[in-house]
Structures are given as structure tokens and as C-alpha cells.
Image (cartoon, rainbow, N blue to C red):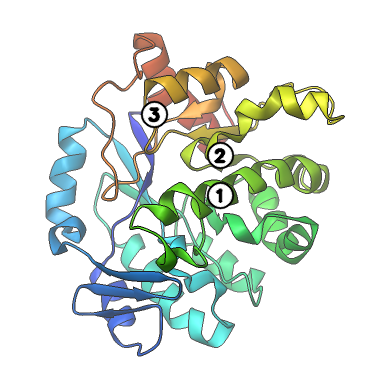
Amino acid sequence: MTNVDVHQHLWSPSLVTALRARREPPYLDGWTLHLDGEPPYDLPPADHDVALRSELAATDGLGLALVSLSAPIGVEWLPGAEARPLLDAYHEGAAALPEPFGAWAAACVRDIDARATAGHLDQGFVGLQLPANALADAAGYARCAPLLDLLEERDLPLFVHPGPAAGGSEGPGWWPAMVPYVQQMHAAWFAFRAYGRPRHPRLRVCFALLAGLAPLHGERFAARGGGGSRPDPSVFVETSSYGPRAVESVVRALGVEAVVQGSDRPYAEPPQHPGHGLGGAAAYAFRIANPRRLLTGKE
């Protein structure tokens, strides 16, 4: 396997058209995105130009860049009848992207339809992304169990990404990324340990943005009766928006084998140094060896 970025977003023309056809959030007015709970956001059209993004991926030396539906816009939480045309548009566009792009499938988490998700996975998607706030407690894992069972049956991974940021419009522009997104990932990390892993023992999972740095709370977890913090070899975290200090700290907590490269492009840039200052061996692990184990389950 070649160099991999497991976390990018690229809105295809079909998805853009579907979002522009709506009149209630989430919807696009031209290139202005309107969401519940967040201020309007102007998307630079170049960020979603496939040719330009292909050039950037080549410049980054990527052999595979995995895109996913932007879970914070809330498509997965819409009623099934509203979510379906948007999900279909996303999968249609993502499946048609040229190399080096691959993609994570998406699914409605309000009205679970494992059969529809199976059909999308049949199109060659590498696994399934779900919003973190759908997997934050026992009820969420019970609701999403048919989707996670499907991944286990097919030996495909789960990608946990922040979902909609309730109340994000009440703070400054950086508030959603720094508060609700991080809180969601923190909750999802511990919910997987409490409810996800016991129910899905063979599931491989990757948490976005270093799981909101939840792995660094291992000592407190142990002190408060949670038991040891022995790393789970099938659990990974990706590096988007973090740098050397955070990455090194998470490596100390989980080991170098748990970290994979993710950039969150176009909302953040990939690191200038792929090993985050930890050397060439770490760069190889983050970009090649660990993504291979995440995506295939093989060394």
C-alpha cells in the first residue's frame, strides 16, 4: 500500500446539486452553506474542484486519499426520506472520483437501513463513517448495531467523525471545532470502550482528530476504576488538525501502531513533516503500515 490520508472531504457536483435543491438546513445557497446551530459558511469553490484536489494529492505524495461526507452538516441525522437523496448523491459522486481518491460510505442514523448501507458498500467504499454523536452512549450503539454488524460481517472498518455542533452559532467561528467536536470525540472514545467493543469484538475503528485527545485521559480512567489502559490493536486515531506535541503524547499513550495520517482537507492542511517530528519510521507507520492494518486488517 502507498501513502494514505484517511480523512478528506470533497463535495462532488451531484452532492452540491442535491444540497442546493433543499430549502431547509442543511442546504447550499450558491456556495454558502446553511446549517442548524452554526453560522452560514462560505465554501471556496476551488476546495471542491476535483482536478485541483487531484493535483494537491499528487503534490502530497498520496496514493490514496479517502473522502467522506461532512458529518457536521447533519445529513445522517435527517429523517430517512430526507437523508436518502443526499446520501445517494454523495455515494454517486464519491464512487465516481478519479484516483487517488477512495471514499467512506455514509448512513442515516435516525432511521437505520442496513440494506441500503450494504448496497452503498457494494460500490467499493472502504468502510463506513458515522457521526460521533450517534455513538456516544449505550442507546447509540444499540441503534447503530445493524450497521456495525454489517461492517464486522464484511471485515470493513468504521470511521468516527464529529457530527453536528448544537449551539455552535452562539460562539466565535472556531467554537464548533474546538468545543462540541472535541467533546463528541471524547465521548465516542469512551463509549466505544464501554459499549462498542463488548458488542463488536472484531470491529476495526478509527477516531478522527486523535479522538479529541481522549487517549491522554488513560491515567484518570485507571484512577477512577476504569481498569487498565492497554491499547486495543484494532483501534486507531487520525491526526487531523494536530501537530507534533499532541501526536507525540498520543503515541506515548497508545503506541505508534495506533496513529494514522488524516488531514481533514480542505478544512485543514496536512502536516509539513509526515512523521510529526518523530522520524522516518513514524512517518512510514502513520502513512503506510497503520492505514494498511486499519483498512485491510493485515500487516
**Which residue corresponds to mark 1?**
160
Residue 55 occupies quadrant: top left
Q: Residues within 10 Å of mark 1 (few under 14, many from 20)?
A: many
Closer to the camera, 285 or 210? 210
Left or right, 158 with reference to 56: right
Closer to the camera, 97 or 262? 262
**Which residue corresponds to mark 2?**
211
Say which mark, if any, is on residue 1: 3
Mark 1 residue type? Val
Left or right, 52 with reference to 4: left
x and y, in percent, of residue 140 in the image: 72, 61
Secondary structure, mark 2, is: helix
Residue visible at 21% across and 40% down?
57
Q: Disc 2 vs disc 1: Cβ atoms closer than 8 Å?
A: yes
x and y, in percent, of residue 2 in the image: 34, 28
Secondary structure, mark 1, is: strand
